[in-house]
Image (tube, rainbow, N blue to C red):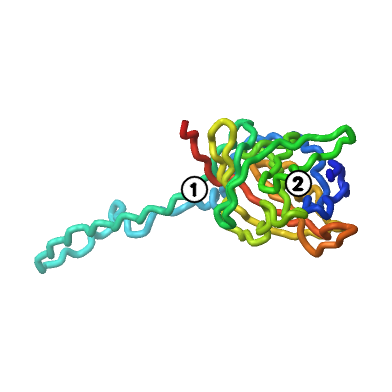
């Protein structure tokens, strides 16, 4: 079976193919605008007027003013100045890694659910439908080659079967992931893009949020999709499981 690349498209069927609409054509991500400095805080008029007309500090000795009386008792030695404690360094804020240049994925690993699987490219058939990973090889995941590659700015889409007629498939436990779990995608350039899960959701096929799942992103993001919910032999699975993740680290090529 295949899934249409249109909003509200065909859902994946009962043989274990993800039962959700295939992604709409991924538009080029918007270019971020220039970063502007925060506006300076203007000095109030009242403060300016007070500055112009401020009196001299009290306690100053002017011409003709009596001198303060001198104490006859011996002056005590001044105490040595106390050294001020050094402020403790503030914890450094870890910045997100810079987006990577385009490079197709080669392998995906999800340690929390013991996944390590090869990745194949998915294109479109003559009808403009997204092809699915082969049912006779349920341990393979598929990447939508018409979208962003994992690690570059945009939304990368990867799909996998939950099960097939032969039994469990690569994404059987995808709904067990939790925020904070990681997804590691090794690319053809040898770089590993590390994504951190920030959301796991199940969407009914009648209420699937196409733009939220497949829409462009201003940072490198990743979506993992498979089928979910109740299963019907005629209509297939009633929902899709979607894992939302974003790039949090990169590891250079070991070659």
Tell me which label, 1 or 2, sits earlier in the chain. Answer: 1
- Residue 58: where, in percent of width, then height? 36, 59
Along the viewing direction, whichever of 122 and 165 lies nearer the viewer: 165
Count of picture labels = 2
Q: Is residue 21 visible?
A: yes
Q: Is residue 182 left or right of residue 133?
A: left
Q: Which residue shows up at 48% across the image and 50% down it?
A: 93
Residue 207 falls in which quadrant of the image?
Answer: bottom right
Label 2 residue SS: loop
Q: Residue at x 35, y 55 (%)?
A: 87
Residue 8 as seen in the image, left or right of residue 82: right
Residue pictured at 82% horizontal, 58% vertical: 237
Q: Residue furthest bottom?
A: 73
- Label 1: few (<14), some or many (≥20) within 10 Å? few
**Is any part of residue 39 visible from this angle?**
no
Where is residue 183 shown, x and y percent of the image? 59, 49
Residue receiving disc 2: 135
Q: CA distance from mark 1 to mark 2?
A: 42 Å
Judging by the rendered image, the residue that carries numbered circle 1 is 94
Task: Pick whichever, 33 or 137, lies toward us.
Answer: 137
Classify residue 180 as left or right of residue 223.
left
């Amino acid at each position: 079976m295949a899934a249409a690349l249109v909003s509200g498209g065909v859902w994946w069927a009962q043989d274990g193919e993800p039962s959700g609409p295939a992604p709409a054509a991924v538009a080029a991500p918007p270019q971020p605008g220039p970063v502007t400095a925060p506006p300076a805080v203007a000095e109030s008029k009242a403060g300016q007027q007070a500055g112009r007309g401020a009196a001299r500090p009290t306690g100053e000795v002017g011409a003709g003013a009596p001198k303060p009386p001198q104490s006859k008792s011996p002056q005590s030695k001044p105490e040595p100045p106390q050294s001020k404690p050094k402020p403790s360094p503030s914890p450094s804020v870890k910045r997100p890694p810079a987006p990577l240049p385009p490079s197709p994925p080669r392998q995906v690993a999800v340690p929390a659910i013991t996944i390590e699987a090869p990745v194949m490219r998915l294109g479109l058939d003559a009808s403009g439908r997204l092809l699915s990973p082969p049912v006779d090889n349920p341990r393979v995941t598929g990447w939508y080659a018409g979208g962003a590659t994992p690690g570059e700015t945009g939304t990368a889409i990867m799909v996998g079967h939950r099960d097939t007629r032969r039994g469990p498939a690569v994404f059987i436990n995808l709904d067990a992931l939790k925020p904070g779990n990681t997804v590691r995608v090794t690319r053809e350039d040898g770089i590993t893009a590390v994504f951190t899960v920030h959301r796991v959701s199940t969407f009914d096929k009648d209420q699937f949020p196409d733009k939220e799942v497949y829409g462009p992103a201003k940072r490198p993001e990743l979506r993992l999709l498979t089928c979910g919910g109740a299963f019907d032999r005629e209509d297939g699975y009633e929902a899709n499981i979607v894992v939302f993740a974003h790039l949090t680290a990169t590891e250079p090529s070991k070659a």
